[in-house]
Amino acid sequence: MATDYDAPRRSQEEELAEDSLEELKARRNETQSGVVDVDTDAPDENFELPGADLSGEELTVKVLPKQDDEFTCGRCFLVHHRSRLAEERNGQMICRDCA
C-alpha cells in the first residue's frame, strides 16, 4: 500500500469517528485468516522438560561393543578411534583431548 507523505495527518480519533461499524467488521474479517501458521522449527510435542518422569520410556538405541580399532581413554573414559591416541602412560591410553 502506497503512503502519501505530503497528505495532512489525521489522528486516531478522527479515523475511528469516520469508520462505520460495517467497515470495522469487514476490516476485522480481512485481517483474520483460517490458515494456521505451523512453525516447522519448533520442537516436537513430545519434548520433555528436565525433571520429567521418564520411568515409562524405553531407549531404542543400538549399543555396539568396543571395536578392535578403538580404545578407552584412561582419563575421560570415552571410547575413541585409534587415530585419536596421543600417548600411553603407565599402561593407560590417553586421547588427544586429554593429553
Image: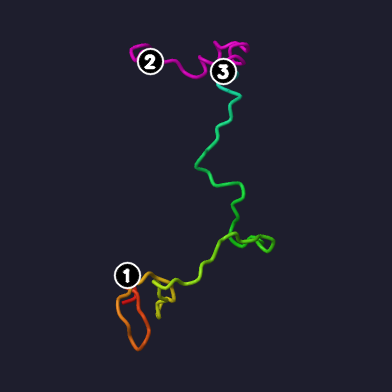
- Could you classify mark 2 by the number of other residues whose Cα lies within 10 Å: few (under 14), some (14-19), or many (20 or more)? few
Q: CA distance from mark 3 to mark 1?
A: 64 Å
Q: Which of the two labelled residues, at mark 2 and mark 1, occupies the earlier sequence position?
A: 2
Closer-to-camera residue (68/23): 68
Which residue is labeled 1 in the image?
Answer: 83
Q: Position of residue 23 (x, y in %)?
A: 58, 12
Mark 3 vs 2: CB contact within 8 A: no
Task: Please state, as top left, top right, bottom left or bottom right, where the N terminus lies in the image.
Answer: top left
Question: The residue under label 2 is which amino acid type?
Answer: Thr
* Residue nearer the viewer, 59 or 11: 59
The x, y position of residue 68, in whole percent, is 42, 73
Whether 74 is drawn above or below 8: the answer is: below
State the image quarter where residue 60 is shown: bottom right
- Write down the residue under mark 2: 3
In terms of secondary structure, where does tag 1 sit?
helix
Q: Secondary structure at mark 3?
A: helix
Q: Residue at x 59, y 15 (%)?
A: 24
Give amino acid for label 1: Ser
Q: Secondary structure at mark 2?
A: loop
Density class for disc 3 (Cα within 10 Å; few <14, some 14-19, many ≥20) is few
Q: Is residue 6 above or below residue 33?
A: above
In this image, 90 relative to 79: left or right?
left
List the residue tagged with mark 3: 30
Q: Earlier in the sequence, mark 3 or mark 2?
A: 2
Asked if the residue at tag 1 contacts the one at tag 3, i.e. Cβ–Cβ closer than 8 Å, the answer is no
Q: Which stretch is magenta?
A: 1-26
Q: Which residue lies most toward the front here? A: 68
| Residue at (68% x, 64% y) in the render | 55
Residue 88: image quadrant is: bottom left
Residue displayed at 35% across by 89% down: 90
